[in-house]
Each structure stands twice: as C-alpha cells, then as structure tokens.
Amino acid sequence: MDILTEALGSMRTGLPTSVRTDGRAPWGLRLPPVAGAGFHVVLYGTCWLIPLDDAPPHLRPIALSPGDVVFLRDGRGHILADDPGTPAEVERPDQYKQVGPIGTVSVGGDGARTTLLCGNYHLDQGRPHPLVRQLPEIIHLPTRHGRHPELSAAVQLLGAELENPRIGSSGIVPTLIDSLLLYILRAWLESQPPAAAAGWAAALGDSAVAPALAAIHADPSVAWTVDALADRAGLSRAAFARRFTALVGEPPMAYLTRWRMTTAARLLRESEDPLTVVAARTGYGSEYAFAKAFKREYGQAPGGYRRQARTAA
C-alpha cells in the first residue's frame, strides 16, 4: 500500500495548473497566495525566492540555481526575482501568452535570462492529511551534482519538453507536472537522516508503525483494534500505541477514524455508490452509524456533502 500516494489522492481537488515564467534581469514578480500547494522548478538561470514582509521570521530568502525545485506547502504568497533588491511587480495580462503545452509569462528587461516552471497543486487545505501538514512550509530541493536523481530526471524531461515542444508534448507535460508532486515529497522524505527523522518521515520507514498504517490504508472496512494492529507491528498493545501516537501525531483509533472519513468523502465525491455501500467500505455496519460519524467529522450529512461536492465541480 503506497501511503504517500493515498494521502495526496485524498486531498486532490483538481488537476495542477502551471505556467512557464521567463524573466530577464532586472525582473521581479510578486505572486499572490494560492489555494493548495505551490511549486517552482528552475529550468535555466538563477533567481531568488523571497518571502513577503508578513512571513514568519524563520522563512528567509532562498537563492535558486538550475535544477532547483521549491515546494510551498500552503501556497504562501512570495516574490521571485533576479536579485533580492529588485522591485517586484504583479503579473499583468499582457505579459501572458499561450505558447506550446502551457502558457508563458515574460517579465523584466534585456539582461540575463531565467526560466522557471511555476504552478500549484489543488489540494484541500481545509482538511489536510497529517503527512502533508507535518511538512516544512517551504521545501528546497537542489537536484544538481547527482542529488535526488529521479526528481532531477523529471526536471530535465520537463525542461526539454517546454524548451522544444514536439508531437505529444501536450499530453506529456501535464503528466510530468502531476507526477512531480510525488517526486518532490519522496525526495524530501528520503533525504531525512534516520537519526533526525521524526513524525511521518519516520513513521513511513518504521518497522512497527509502517505495517499498521499500510493495513489501515489497504482496508479501512476491517474492524481494526489496537490489539490487532499491535500484533502486526510485533509489539505489545501499550508499546505500539505509544510509538504510533508519537510518530503519526494521534492514537491508532483516531487515525483509523480519520482515514475512514477521508475515504468516505472521496467515495462520495468520485463515485455513485449508495450510502449503504460507502458505509460498508469504510467499516460501518449501518448507514445510520456511518451518517452520524460523517456528520460529526464534516459538519453535514453524507448526502448533502455529495450534492455540494458535485455542484462545486
């Protein structure tokens, strides 16, 4: 069971959007907050990512080089510029053109060129999965000098397709951008030193907690108990509960309920299954018990949630 893919899939509310940004020094672009998570890939040249004045003090300007990838967990507003001292402007409609598989924004003067792929992943930040919630606000991943080879390969493929669009590029580029999110998060999770890893970064590689998480994700309809999950982990009930809570951030049964409700919401949005089937697939013996639990978690009945989700789509 691929928990990372499952966790992200539970938050997805649409396809990613992206634009190619071509800047020539001096240039600066002020980017507003976005719903979901933002990202930038430096395809050519260098630049700076600069937090806005209202950002927390621990967020500092970041120098970016070719191949660097930046992930902004909460879609925080920020500035991209050739230099921290360059004034930043807000994108104007006349700067945008539809060229190749995605649009292009051109800014700046006639100096050194920088090219980035910029965009956002539409994620439900109202109910973020704890794996995503525990990520740093900004993740910076350099891919030069052999670091993160799979992510580097994806960046190179994207760069080639955007620099020289050919037959098939309109299908290849969106797929690569969609896959990039998993490459980014996998690279970050796997880059955490074992001794320093904590939270979900440690949980996914933990010999006791990871099998329990996989069991919950594989079949949330099973009547899991702490004892049953502890047996899979090879620990006593008390030791397993402590370890699970410390790494995941909540007790085993609380996470089981969270994942059941997350799965139910996804089924209500994406399937035509009747409520009795959704209830059974998420571990509830009756539609009434399921509806009560769902309303407690989401603040509305399952039927109303489904109608609202379809209307929004």
Image (tube, rainbow, N blue to C red):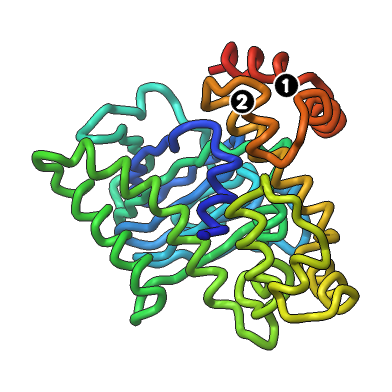
Give coordinates of residue 112: x percent, y percent.
Answer: 30, 57
Kindly identify the residue that appears in the image at 78 percent across and 19 percent down.
Answer: 301
**Residues at marks 1 and 2, CA–CA distance in whole angstroms:** 7 Å
Who's the residue at 39% across and 46% down the image? 178
Residue drawn at (84%, 79%), measured in percent from left and top? 236
> Which of the 4 quarters of the picture holds residue 267?
top right
Per the image, the residue denoted by label 1 is 302
Residue at image point 69% right, 50% down: 222
- Residue type at mark 1 is Pro
Identify the mark at residue 268; answer none if there is no mark: 2
Q: Is residue 300 left or right of residue 75?
A: right
Q: Secondary structure at mark 2?
A: helix
Which of marks 2 and 1 precedes in the sequence?
Answer: 2
**Foreground of the two, 150 or 42:** 150
The three-letter code of the residue at mark 2 reads Leu
| Occupied quadrant, residue 260 | top right
